[in-house]
Image (tube, grey):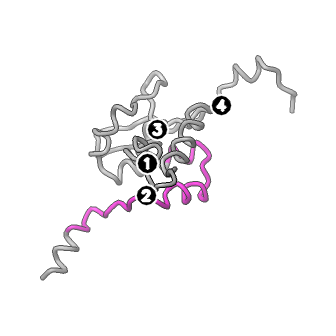
């Protein structure tokens, strides 16, 4: 294998992407692995979201908004020009989308970004579980 120079590294196109079928939304979306800056920002968000002061108050309460899967979706879904489709401003609208769909897309984003099963488990340990589509039916049936 050749020893690379700076020009070789800068012209290399290594960001992988995958087309994900989203029939619930009526089509497909492109999901791309996070670049180094996006990954650093995401990792910082993960660390900061659980930081508390000596009184138990969150140091970064704004980081408590939006779960890990939504953050991955925002950092990995791209448009036809390869630009990120969503931003943090889209969190409220994305939060109302199907948890199953968001999980499917974010799982691809995590896979492409090289997030190991261990790091995914660490990041999701404090996340709220997503109820199944028929969990409300199960609860209603148990009342009878």
Mark 4 and mark 3: Cα distance apart in space:
16 Å
Q: Is residue 68 magenta?
A: no
Which residue is denoted by mark 2 in the rendering? Answer: 127
Give the CA separation, mark 2 to mark 4: 31 Å
Determine crowd level at label 2: few under 14, some 14-19, many 20+ residues with C-alpha closer than 10 A. Answer: few
Position in image of residue 62 (x %, y %):
40, 41
Q: Which residue is mark 1?
A: 69
Q: Earlier in the sequence, mark 2 or mark 1?
A: 1
Please rate how many residues cluster around mark 3, counting C-alpha atoms within 10 Å: few if below 14, some from 14 to 19, many from 20.
Answer: few
17 lies above or below 139: above
Gap in angstroms between the C-alphas marked 2 and 3: 26 Å
The image shows residue 30 at horizontal and vertical percentages of 45, 35
Q: Earlier in the sequence, mark 3 or mark 1?
A: 3
Look at the numbered disc 3 and give the secondary structure of its residue: strand
Q: Which residue is mark 4?
A: 14
Q: Residue at x 35, y 44 (%)?
A: 22
Q: Give the magenta-colored segment's residue range.
A: 108-136
Residue 15 lies in what quarter of the image? top right
Residue bearing mark 3: 19
Quick one: label 1, few (<14), some, or many (20+) residues within 10 Å? Answer: many
Outermost residue, front side:
55
Q: Are marks 4 and 3 in contact (CB under 8 Å)?
A: no
Q: Nearer the viewer, mark 4 or mark 1?
A: 1
> Is mark 2 in CB contact (under 8 Å) with mark 1?
yes
Tag 2 and tag 4, C-beta contact below 8 Å: no
Residue that protrudes farthest toward the top in the picture: 7
């Amino acid at each position: 294998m050749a020893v690379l120079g700076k020009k070789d590294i800068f012209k290399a196109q290594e960001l992988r992407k995958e087309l994900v079928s989203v029939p619930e939304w009526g089509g497909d979306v492109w999901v791309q692995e996070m670049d180094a800056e996006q990954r650093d920002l995401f990792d910082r968000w993960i660390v900061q979201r659980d930081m508390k002061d000596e009184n138990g108050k969150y140091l970064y309460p704004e980081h408590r908004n939006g779960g890990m899967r939504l953050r991955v979706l925002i950092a990995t879904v791209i448009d036809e020009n390869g630009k990120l489709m969503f931003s943090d401003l889209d969190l409220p609208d994305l939060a109302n989308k199907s948890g199953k769909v968001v999980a499917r897309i974010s799982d691809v984003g995590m896979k492409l970004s090289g997030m190991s099963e261990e790091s995914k488990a660490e990041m999701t340990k404090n996340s709220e579980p997503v109820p199944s589509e028929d969990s409300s039916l199960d609860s209603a049936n148990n009342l009878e």
